[in-house]
Image (tube, rainbow, N blue to C red):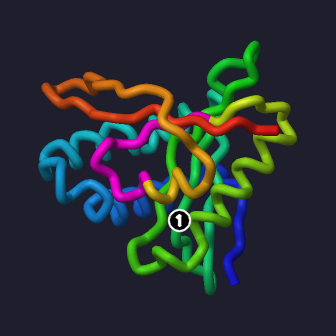
């Protein structure tokens, strides 16, 4: 059975470990090792995760048999228009296809709906195999963007969104 919990400051190291263990599988076929390492170091430093938590990002951690196996992170990005963004959703590769991602996604949707969201957005790399998962979850491509993330690297993403009723 999979359990979900809201992450606390003491979960930062687990979030970092899960990111490090999932990103190589998620991005390794189309991003360089150097870019993956740069992004992990930039986005998953303890200080950065703590900063995100302090800014209102909610992290949910999925655990099975006492082991953390995945996480999601989301926040409000436009309070006036009630737009929320799913910033992160990663599951350890050996747990793909077992419903953990869907469980996390459904919990995020439930939480943003309760918070009054009209829309849930996300960015996904245009080459990411998770595209099919997001389409099945009801997301549609809103626009195509190329984002400069520093150090000469770019992310070639789709911005996807799903209306929340």
Lateral position of residue 44 relative to residue 109, left or right? left
Give the x, y percent position of residue 38: 22, 41
Q: Quadrant of residue 16?
A: bottom left
Q: Residue at horizontal 67%, vertical 18%?
A: 78
Q: Residue at horizontal 78%, vertical 32%?
A: 117
Q: Quadrant of residue 144?
A: top left
In front: 102, or 72?
Answer: 102
Number of numbered discs overlaid on the protein picture: 1
Lateral position of residue 34 relative to residue 55, left or right? left
Name the image quarter holding the C terminus.
top right
Give the x, y percent position of residue 137: 61, 54
Q: Quadrant of residue 107?
A: bottom right
Q: Residue at horizontal 41%, vertical 42%?
A: 124
In front: 57, or 48?
Answer: 57
Which range of residues does the magenta coloring cover? 121-131
In front: 145, or 27?
Answer: 145
Q: Examine the rendered structure and indicate whether residue 164 appears above or below residue 152.
A: below
Give the x, y percent position of residue 112: 76, 40
Q: Residue at horizontal 62%, vertical 67%?
A: 62
In front: 113, or 8?
Answer: 113
Name the image quarter holding the N terminus.
bottom right
Lateral position of residue 81 relative to residue 96, left or right? right
Is 123 colored magenta in this rendering?
Answer: yes
Give the structural element (helix, strand or loop) at label 1: strand
Mark 1 Cα-neighbour bin, 10 Å: few <14, some 14–19, many ≥20 = many
Is 125 colored magenta in this rendering?
Answer: yes
Residue at the farthest top position:
80
Give the x, y percent position of residue 123: 45, 37
Badge 1 is on which residue?
Answer: 70
């Amino acid at each position: 059975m999979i359990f979900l919990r809201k992450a606390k400051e003491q979960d930062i190291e687990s979030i970092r470990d899960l990111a490090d263990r999932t990103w190589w599988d998620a991005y390794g076929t189309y991003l360089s090792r150097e870019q993956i390492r740069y992004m992990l170091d930039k986005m998953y430093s303890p200080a950065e995760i703590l900063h995100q938590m302090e800014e209102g990002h909610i992290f949910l951690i999925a655990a099975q048999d006492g082991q953390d196996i995945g996480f999601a992170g989301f926040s409000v990005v436009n309070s006036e228009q009630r737009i929320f963004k799913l910033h992160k959703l990663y599951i350890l590769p050996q747990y793909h296809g077992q419903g953990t991602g869907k469980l996390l996604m459904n919990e995020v949707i439930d939480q943003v709906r309760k918070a009054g969201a009209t829309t849930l957005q996300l960015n996904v790399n245009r080459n990411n195999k998770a595209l099919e998962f997001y389409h099945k979850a009801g997301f549609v491509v809103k626009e195509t963007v190329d984002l400069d993330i520093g150090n000469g690297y770019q992310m070639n993403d789709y911005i996807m969104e799903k209306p929340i009723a």
